[in-house]
Amino acid sequence: MVETEHIYSTLRGEGPEMDALIAEFIGRLPHFRSEIDGALEQKNRGALKEAVHKIKGLGGGYGYVELTSLARKVEQEIANNNEVTLAETTQQLILYIDRIIASGL
């Protein structure tokens, strides 16, 4: 089942400055997604780890705690060197990013 529920920042509505920062972050998510896609296509674990690490660090700061949690799980799967669970977890992260983008501010 594909999740379709909107995902919004927990910091949404904290003020116009914060909303502008969140909107900027959402605008950058397609770039981060492209980095992940490129790393997967090239089978480049180092690039995947770097892209996921950026998302992990930024997600919580912009009020997307689950985004940070999913990115952390991908980092753990990279460290565990488990191809099957890495692919599944990375796909979950990609779908979550897509849902945030689709939800907007």
Image (spheres, helix red, strand yellow):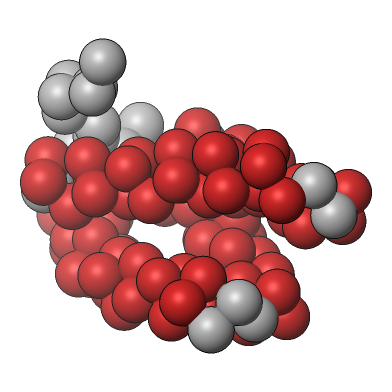
Q: Is residue 93 left or right of residue 48?
A: left
Q: Is residue 88 visible?
A: yes
Q: Quadrant of residue 69?
A: top right
Q: Is residue 74 above or below residue 45?
A: above
Q: Is residue 95 above or below residue 18?
A: above
Query: Which residue lies at the image location 73% right of the left edge and 80% below the top edge?
Result: 46
- The quarter in which the N terminus is drawn is top left
Q: Is residue 26 left or right of residue 40?
A: left
Give the x, y percent position of residue 85.
67, 38
Query: Which residue lies at the image location 45% right of the left edge and 38% below the top edge?
Result: 92
Give the x, y percent position of residue 87.
57, 48
Query: Which residue lies at the image location 60% right of the left edge and 56% below the top edge?
Result: 56
As rendered, which of 104 and 51 lies closer to the eye? 51
As rendered, which of 3 and 58 lies closer to the eye? 3
Query: Which residue lies at the image location 88% right of the left edge and 49% below the top edge?
Result: 80
- Please state the total of marks drawn on the protein image: 0
